[in-house]
Amino acid sequence: FFVTLRMWRVVLKPLVLGGQYEYILVEKRGENKNVGFIQLNRPKALNALCDGLMKEVGQALDAFEVDKEVGAIVITGSDRAFAAGADIKEMQNRTFQECYGGNFLAHWNRVSTVRKPVIAAVNGFALGGGCELAMMCDIIYAGEKAQFGQPEILLGTIPGAGGTQRLTRAVGKSLAMEMVLTGDRISAQEAKQSGLVSKICPVDQLVSEAVKCGEKIASNSKLVSAMAKEAVNAAFELTLAEGNHLEKRLFHATFATNDRKEGMTAFVEKRKASFQDD
Ligand code: CAA
């Protein structure tokens, strides 16, 4: 019988491959299924971030962004590798013309424009684009054996998805320069010391700890969480005066929400707040 390309892509491929995605596993976790969960799933390539994988991550994020149940998102990899970087085999023969003309890696940016809070749970290698992907997230939890690095210099290139910018803001100039110029990796402990990650967990507890953090965030008002995220992120873009001004306006804006009223009323009535995200 006759199978068109479209039929294969839209109907048959998802059935054959057991889901909508080829390179990632996607589900909702937490007691109330309110944490969107994305697991990078190219184990043989140490989750190298090929174009198809990052497109799927973008699609999964789009779906969680509009899902009213989801209040936070966790991105993780395997115990061995969060992600070993952009796919070197895919990049090997690319020309400047193709990179510049096609704005290579621009779509990765979707991860940093999600309005819901995103937590990276990093076990194993987070190298190059893997480290950059983690840094696009809002919170990074690391497993005890995690390693972070920007080894692009060893390939004759430089980080291209925010590594020189976000790493420098996270760990300061000296350590960022050393990592970017030597390609040396840092351990989870060094990452914690330098402020790159907020928590270190045993390898086998990392994902559940990240989901727990996601559940805690999801139990608050989604509307107000988005405002809080916007305000913190503004600290990286604005002067102190501009940032404080934006914060003040967003703070004032929370007084237009029912959730702010509910939160303060619940406190005064000595009960747990029940936020409706409005
Ligand atoms: N791209 C494509 N394939 C990769 C990969 C990558 N970034 N990283 C690992 N792999 C593949 C390997 O080619 C290998 O596949 P084969 O079995 O088919 O040969 C498989 O994953 C396992 O890797 P290794 O055999 O190398 O495993 P190892 O335990 O000896 O070493 C490692 C692990 C130290 C992570 C090593 O794989 C490595 O150095 N990887 C590359 C890391 C890197 O340079 N990342 C930066 C990429 S550039 C970038 O990300 C640009 C950007 O800013 C966006």
Image: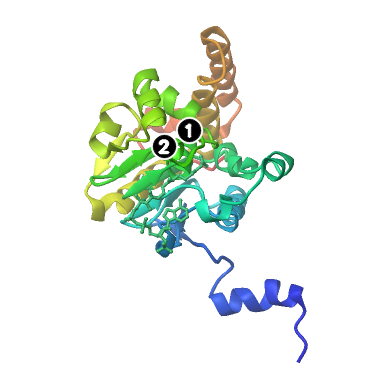
User: In percent of the image, x 41 and y 39: which residue is there?
Assistant: 151
Label 2 and label 1: CA atoms lie apart by 7 Å
Instruction: Indicate if the residue with disc 1 has its beta carbon within 8 Å of ligand 1.
Output: yes
Q: Position of residue 95 (x, y in %)?
A: 66, 45
The residue where tag 1 is placed is 163
Type of residue at label 2? Gln
Q: Secondary structure at mark 1?
A: helix
The residue where tag 2 is placed is 150
Instruction: Indicate if the residue with disc 2 has its beta carbon within 8 Å of ligand 1.
Output: yes
Which mark, by number, is residue 277?
A: none
Q: Position of residue 195 (x, y in %)?
A: 33, 27
Mark in front: 2 vs 1: 2
In contact (CB < 8 Å): disc 2 and disc 1: yes
Q: Mark yes or no: residue 272 visible.
A: no
Could you say which is closer to the camera, residue 234 or residue 178?
178
Q: Is residue 231 above or below residue 76?
A: above
